[in-house]
């Protein structure tokens, strides 16, 4: 055992990290991602490969069952840490890493899931084949996945037959501290309510970073790792408050590369078409409505907006009032947040596509479930 | 006809292949880290980034494998172990200069058979754990095999046709004057594409895609994971190395000794593939199958026809 513990201690100095975001934990997720990058720690795609499970956000009693299942799926020796707020990311990661290296290396067998084997009745698929129907629950923890979203799919092979969204993880969750709006919408909401003085530049900066974050996810799910990494780096630079003059060139280079990439177009064209009429009927606003087309069109709208916002990151004027506040996902209607409408169109778009396309569609709409949470002084949003 | 290497070469081969795979993985890790976190901050940082695969190896050795409910553990483990074994066995017919561990009369067929073995390995790993995501990865791998295997076999056939022999030594000897890549460029390019497909890596990494949480490998931990992912790198090195005797003249070349030419050419092909990964996104088979069958198969057939006519005309 001496050799094994020595090897484990060596490996524990640079653990592979599985980061899981909870609704309302966006700021903390961004801080953790930046911190992992700074330390050069590898990211795990699956619990089977993780040494360290990092939960970004504040768990509630409803999260505990699935967080426990996820933790049990991480083979020991491993450690878990909850990063409740962005400011705590660095020191909590330090603590968790040092615990990994020194914790007693108990040799307990890795537990197995307690689910029954996943087969169900057979049915005809779209090609008239009789295949087993598999029930698959996607989320709440998956790489490049909207925090807190759960999708229940019926699959045949890798074709999605039916899909339903389950937002119980986010709806009704009370996010503390009081007064915290969803991270991406915060400046826009503050500007609209007039509670605290916000400049146009602050609103533009947050929206710009939000689109870069969404685009990075979409590109990562599509398999364009290099472009995805580039978008993430730009996102972190924008959020760090870099002056517009210094960053506008980099942003333009990034958006043009993404928009002009033929391979990206080939991968995304025709996936998840959402015509304007259908989008409007479902109450969708923002980029998904403007795009009036497929996943690639939605990506192009994000890129165009990133470039537009990138030019006024430092605009000191007060925001225009009237017409309601507009966040990165659309018009911030307190009765029905824009992401609720996006979630509403999701099942219809997913039926009949293959699994890879389903992931692309989810990422191209990128609903922000933080918008469905509530805070003690915000009215609880109705379930959309 | 290549000379047979001494017996100890057979013992050294797996270790040499693993070391080469580790070097290739290190270069890839360097590129990936600079894409993700920007350029390295000094030499120490660069060394630490390059050591990522080594660290991962140590880590996976020390960690325990994971078990899932109702899994066929034996099948999964067998599948993961088959991948590096297939890579080593395929490497046995690869000439180092003009010397290979073994040079059977059907070396090209042997190489292709080992690829089929790796196929079985990946599919078993996808099937074994009784997990939906890993099975989707397995399905993807089968679809991918359908897409690339036929053009790949025609590319191999073309090289054998040019040498009028299935013995790898003869294929190298036939290129003492003119390398095959010069008059079989299509077959060479298709071979490189299918080499990526065969090692299910880079643009053909969809079976282990991030969208299915690393797919085939989703339930693998510890040594099983190391065997599959390390075996993947070994397959990549083997397929890249095999393009040298097939199309790039093997050990033929001026000034340098034969082994150095083999090393140089293999390194160049590997560098090309590792860089290609940064440029090319992952191909989804629902989008790639059609061009593979409608474009690549006719092209490789035309290439084979051209070579056949040229050989008849000698």
Image: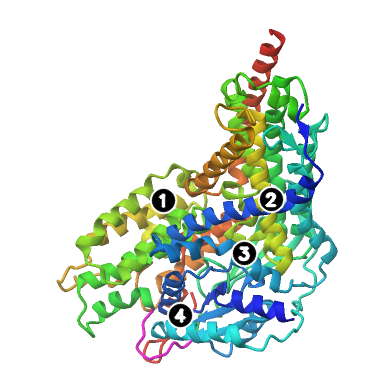
Would you call the spot at circle 2 few (<14 residues within 10 Å), some (14-19), or many (20 or more)? some
Q: Is residue A285 visible?
A: no
Question: Given contact means CB atoms under 8 Å apart, are the residues at marks 1 and 2 in contact?
Answer: no
Q: Determine the residue positioned at 80% across, 37% down.
A: B102
- Residue B55 percent across, percent down from the top left: 59, 67
Q: Residue furthest left?
A: A317
| Residue receiving disc 1 | A297
| Residue receiving disc 2 | B16
Q: CA distance from mark 1 to mark 4?
A: 28 Å
| Residue receiving disc 4 | A25
Same chain for mark 1 and mark 2? The answer is no
Q: CA distance from mark 3 to mark 4?
A: 26 Å
Which SS type dominates the magenta stretch?
loop
Callout 4: SS: loop
Earlier in the chain: of badge 3 and badge 4, it is 4
- Residue A376 percent across, percent down from the top left: 40, 92
> Who is closer to the viewer here, A98 or A366?
A98
Q: Nearer the viewer, mark 3 or mark 2?
A: 2
Q: Which residues are magenta?
A: A173-182
> Who is closer to the viewer here, A141 or A11?
A11
Q: Is residue B161 above or below residue B245?
A: above
Earlier in the chain: of badge 1 and badge 3, it is 3
Q: CA distance from mark 1 to mark 2?
A: 48 Å
Q: Quadrant of the N terminus of chain A?
A: bottom right
Residue B206 has which mark? none
What subunit carries mark 2?
Answer: B
Q: Nearer the viewer, mark 1 or mark 4?
A: 4
| Residue receiving disc 3 | A163
């Amino acid at each position: 055992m001496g050799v094994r513990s020595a090897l484990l201690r060596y490996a524990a100095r640079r653990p592979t990290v599985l980061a899981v975001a909870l609704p309302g934990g966006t700021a903390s997720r961004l801080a953790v991602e930046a911190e992992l990058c700074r330390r050069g720690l590898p990211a795990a795609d699956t619990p089977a490969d993780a040494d360290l499970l990092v939960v970004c956000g504040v768990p509630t009693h409803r999260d505990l069952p699935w967080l426990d299942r996820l933790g049990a799926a991480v083979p020991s020796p491993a450690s878990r840490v909850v990063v409740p707020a962005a400011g705590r990311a660095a020191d909590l990661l330090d603590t968790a890493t040092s615990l990994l290296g020194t914790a007693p290396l108990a040799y307990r067998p890795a537990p197995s899931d307690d689910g029954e084997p996943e087969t169900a009745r057979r049915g005809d698929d779209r090609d008239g084949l009789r295949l087993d129907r598999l029930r698959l629950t996607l989320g709440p923890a998956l790489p490049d996945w909207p925090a807190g979203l759960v999708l229940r799919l019926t699959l045949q092979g890798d074709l999605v037959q039916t899909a339903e969204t389950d937002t119980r993880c986010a709806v009704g969750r009370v996010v503390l501290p009081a007064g915290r709006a969803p991270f991406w919408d915060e400046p826009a909401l503050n500007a609209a309510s007039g509670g605290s003085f916000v400049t146009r530049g602050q609103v533009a900066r947050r929206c710009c970073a939000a689109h870069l974050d969404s685009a990075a996810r979409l590109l990562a799910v599509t398999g364009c790792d290099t472009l995805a990494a580039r978008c993430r780096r730009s996102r972190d630079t924008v959020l760090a408050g870099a002056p517009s003059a210094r960053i506008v060139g980099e942003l333009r280079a990034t958006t043009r590369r993404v928009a002009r990439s033929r391979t990206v177009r080939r991968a995304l064209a025709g996936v998840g078409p959402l015509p304007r009429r259908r989008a409007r009927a479902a109450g969708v606003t923002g980029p998904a409505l403007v795009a009036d087309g497929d996943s690639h069109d939605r990506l192009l709208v994000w890129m165009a907006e990133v470039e537009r916002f990138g030019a006024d990151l430092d605009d000191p004027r007060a925001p225009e009032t009237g017409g309601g506040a507009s966040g990165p996902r659309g018009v911030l209607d307190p009765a029905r947040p824009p992401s609720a409408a996006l979630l509403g169109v999701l099942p219809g778009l997913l039926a009949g596509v293959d699994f890879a396309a389903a992931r692309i569609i989810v990422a191209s709409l990128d609903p922000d479930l933080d918008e469905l949470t509530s805070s003690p002084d915000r009215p609880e949003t109705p379930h959309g | 006809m290549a000379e047979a290497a001494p017996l100890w070469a057979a013992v050294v081969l797996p270790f040499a292949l693993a070391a080469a795979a580790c070097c290739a993985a290190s270069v890839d890790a360097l590129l990936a880290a600079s894409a993700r976190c920007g350029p390295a901050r000094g030499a120490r940082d660069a060394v630490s980034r390059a050591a990522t695969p080594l660290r991962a190896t140590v880590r996976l050795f020390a960690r325990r494998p994971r078990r899932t409910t109702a899994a066929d553990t034996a099948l999964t483990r067998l599948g993961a172990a088959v991948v590096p074994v297939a890579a080593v066995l395929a490497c046995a017919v690869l000439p180092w200069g003009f010397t290979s561990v073994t040079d059977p009369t059907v070396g090209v067929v042997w190489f292709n058979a080992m690829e089929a073995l790796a196929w079985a390995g990946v599919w078993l790993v996808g099937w074994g754990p009784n997990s939906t995501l890993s099975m989707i990865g397995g399905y993807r791998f089968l679809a991918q095999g359908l897409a690339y295997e036929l053009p790949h076999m025609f590319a191999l056939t073309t090289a054998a046709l040019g040498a009028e022999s299935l013995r790898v030594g003869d294929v190298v000897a036939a290129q003492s004057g003119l390398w095959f890549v010069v008059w079989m460029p299509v077959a060479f390019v298709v071979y490189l594409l299918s080499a990526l497909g065969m090692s299910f890596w880079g643009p053909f990494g969809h079976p282990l895609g991030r969208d299915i949480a690393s797919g085939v490998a989703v339930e693998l931990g510890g040594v099983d994971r190391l065997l599959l992912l390390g075996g993947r790198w070994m397959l990549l090195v083997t397929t890249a190395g095999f393009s040298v005797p097939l199309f790039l003249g093997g050990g033929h070349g001026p000034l340098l000794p034969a082994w150095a030419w083999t090393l140089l050419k293999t390194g160049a092909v590997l560098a090309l593939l590792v860089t290609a990964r940064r440029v090319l996104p992952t191909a989804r088979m629902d989008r790639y199958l059609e061009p593979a069958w409608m474009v690549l198969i006719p092209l490789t057939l035309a290439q084979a026809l051209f070579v056949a006519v040229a050989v008849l005309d000698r």
